[in-house]
Image (tube, rainbow, N blue to C red):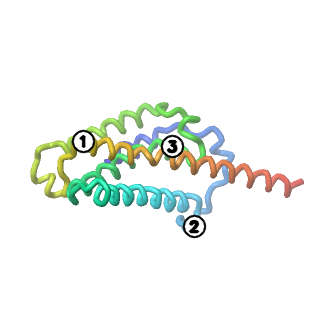
Amino acid sequence: SDTAVALALGAEKAEKDIMNKKPENNKKNIFLSKTGFNILYMSVVQSIIILVLYFLSVYIWGFSNLVTTTMCFITLVCMELFHAYNLRSEEKSIFELGVFSNKLLNYAFIASFILTTIVVLAPINFLHQALNITFLNTTQWAICIGFSFLIIPIVEIFKVFIRMYEKRKYKTKALKNI
């Protein structure tokens, strides 16, 4: 579902200051690096969003287990598509980069979303049975899109803290050099 989007990220323009950044130590375990931390916190955020959706769907809204798992499936797939916009930069805001400036990413997003929608809406019984999904009503689709979109503001807020940390770290390092 997100292969085209991942390939489109490869067409992203390089950040202007990329060559000024210190490379990560390739001998260090990836999970102990900045990249590993990003993978961990983004996985936790996505898991929490899905778990909250599952809880609300079953215990508050009273949806069936099949509808709930379908909603979680769609939300996870769409969240990955939205999250691709966050991944354009580890530190810079998507608004700073220009939300829709990577045209290839926009096309890949649309194509992947359409394919996901076709899989869920196609009246192909064996496909629904294999994926354990069912049809959703408009409200359920809106809930899925809303929960999927949450990844953007959450990561944007996190990037604010990353920029504050980096700026503070840079100032501390500059003061030590004086």
Q: Quadrant of residue 103?
A: top left
Q: Quadrant of residue 66?
A: bottom left
What is the x, y in percent for residue 23? Answer: 63, 55
Instruction: Give the left or right position of residue 108, taking residue 174 as reference.
Output: left
- For label 3, the residue is 88
- For label 2, the residue is 32
Q: Residue at x 49, y 31 (%)?
A: 101
Q: Residue at x 31, y 48 (%)?
A: 1
Q: Residues within 10 Å of mark 1 (few under 14, many from 20)?
A: some
Q: Is residue 78 above or below residue 40?
A: above
Mark 3 and mark 2 in contact? Answer it, CB < 8 Å.
no
Considering the numbered disc 2 on the image, is that residue within a helix, a strand or a loop? Answer: helix
Q: Residue at x 36, y 38 (%)?
A: 109
N-terminal of the two: label 2 or label 1? Answer: 2
Mark 3 and mark 1 in contact? Answer it, CB < 8 Å.
no
Considering the numbered disc 3 on the image, is that residue within a helix, a strand or a loop? Answer: loop
